[in-house]
Image (tube, rainbow, N blue to C red):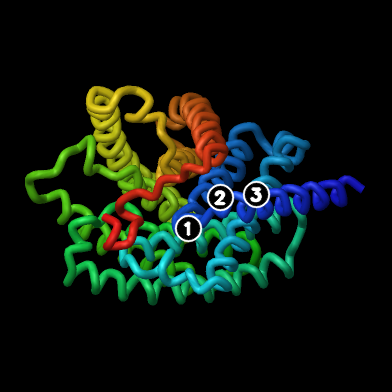
Amino acid sequence: MIIVLYFLLLGFLFIGAVVFIILKQININTAAMVAVVAFGIVTQGVLLNYFGMPFFLGSLGMILSIADLALWLAFLVSIGITISKGEFKELHYVNPINRFGIGTWVAGTSICGIMFFRQFGAGAEAQALAILNAGLWIIYIWISIRGFKELGAAPFGRQAHGVLLLTTVSTQSLVLLFNTVFKEVPFFLNAALIFTGLLFYFISAWFILKRYAVRGWNLAKDWNNTNCIFHGALSISGLAMFKSGIAAGSIAMWFWLVVFLVFMVVEAIEIIRLVLRIRMYGLKEGIFTYDVTQWSRIFNLAMFFTFTFFIESPLQAIILNTGIWVILLLLVIEIYLSADSLRRKHVPIPAGFRKESSI
């Protein structure tokens, strides 16, 4: 009986979200699915691991999972609407940098597939979703390769930022999905996907660092929120290696140490940027104005938390006991900013996601 009520709640939230999107005439940003990914990682990776299965199987844990699934389904409907209106190419494909945001569709589907499997016992259904998601990933990677070629030969390359690293995130999310819903995943498949994800990491990092290797940019204005994916993409890579059995013991520990060092460098930059933005724009405009890319910060912190949970280190307890509250605080703030922005129907599109003509 309780499972029926959960499905009814899922249907109610899904329909409500779709009606809201239609009535508000909201065009979902290409990378908006990052909210689904972030919320899913917080639910599956942070809350489940920290508070344990009893909490997660309780009503609150299930409601959070259902809310994320409903949001994912509503976003898929929104994408379908753009296709039916003939607006898909203009909104999601024209800008080569914006295309990389489609990686959130793959990662969002991966986390939702894991939820379907764990919370609703959807074995065959979750496996079918994993196969469909693999097809979406192949299309996305093809699009991304074309995008990398265009970035190397066009002014768009000077706008490169962390969204490129979604090539890595989407690839490693597929590894996590496969190793959750299938009993056995061939070693060569896990290894090939993980290697591919790391290869895209270095390619993306080269484009991003090339942009910031020149003079004339300002940390407060030109450093993108998505750049924190530098450590998030490594965290999900490490988790994929650990969960698939590719890496364990000292290898996993050394990889975690690399992730930790990248985390410290990137977050130090973020703190300096935070201070500069407050000085330049004030508290409200500097840090408390909604931007869809802010969800990427929650995803990255939650991903680092999740990876840390599985790797024993001298800092593990400190990171977990402190990180849980930092992540939850940021999540509450982001939900408030999102709700306030939607209430006012003011959903700004970051410069890196706009068409060339609107930059």
Please name the residue shown 17% across and 54% down the image. Answer: 211
Residue 284 in view (yes/no): yes
Q: Quadrant of residue 96?
A: bottom left
Crowding at dot 3, Cα within 10 Å, few <14 / some 14-19 / many 20+, comes out as: some
Q: Which residue is mark 2?
A: 36
Counting residues from the N terminus, which is met first, the one under dot 1 or under dot 2? 2
Q: Is residue 312 left or right of residue 49?
A: left
Q: CA gap, disc 3 to disc 2?
A: 17 Å
Q: Position of residue 50 (x, y in %)?
A: 59, 33
Q: Amino acid at mark 2?
A: Val
Counting residues from the N terminus, which is met first, the one under dot 3 or under dot 2? 3
Residue 69 in view (yes/no): no
Q: Position of residue 306 (x, y in %)?
A: 50, 42
Please name the residue shown 42% across and 52% down the image. Answer: 238
State the residue in front, 13 or 124.
13
Q: Are marks 1 and 2 in contact (CB under 8 Å)?
A: yes
Q: Which residue is mark 1?
A: 104
Q: Position of residue 333 (x, y in %)?
A: 50, 29
Q: CA gap, disc 1 to disc 2?
A: 8 Å
Please name the residue shown 47% across and 51% down the image. Answer: 239
Q: Which residue is mark 3?
A: 20
Please name the residue shown 16% across and 49% down the image. Answer: 212
Q: Nearer the viewer, mark 3 or mark 1?
A: 3
Counting residues from the N terminus, which is met first, the one under dot 3 or under dot 1? 3
Crowding at dot 1, Cα within 10 Å, few <14 / some 14-19 / many 20+, comes out as: many
Instruction: Give above or below for 12 relative to 338.
Output: below
Q: Is residue 236 left or right of residue 3?
A: left
Q: Amino acid at mark 1?
A: Thr
Q: CA gap, disc 3 to disc 1?
A: 22 Å
State the residue in front, 260 or 106.
106
State the residue in front, 265 or 222.
222
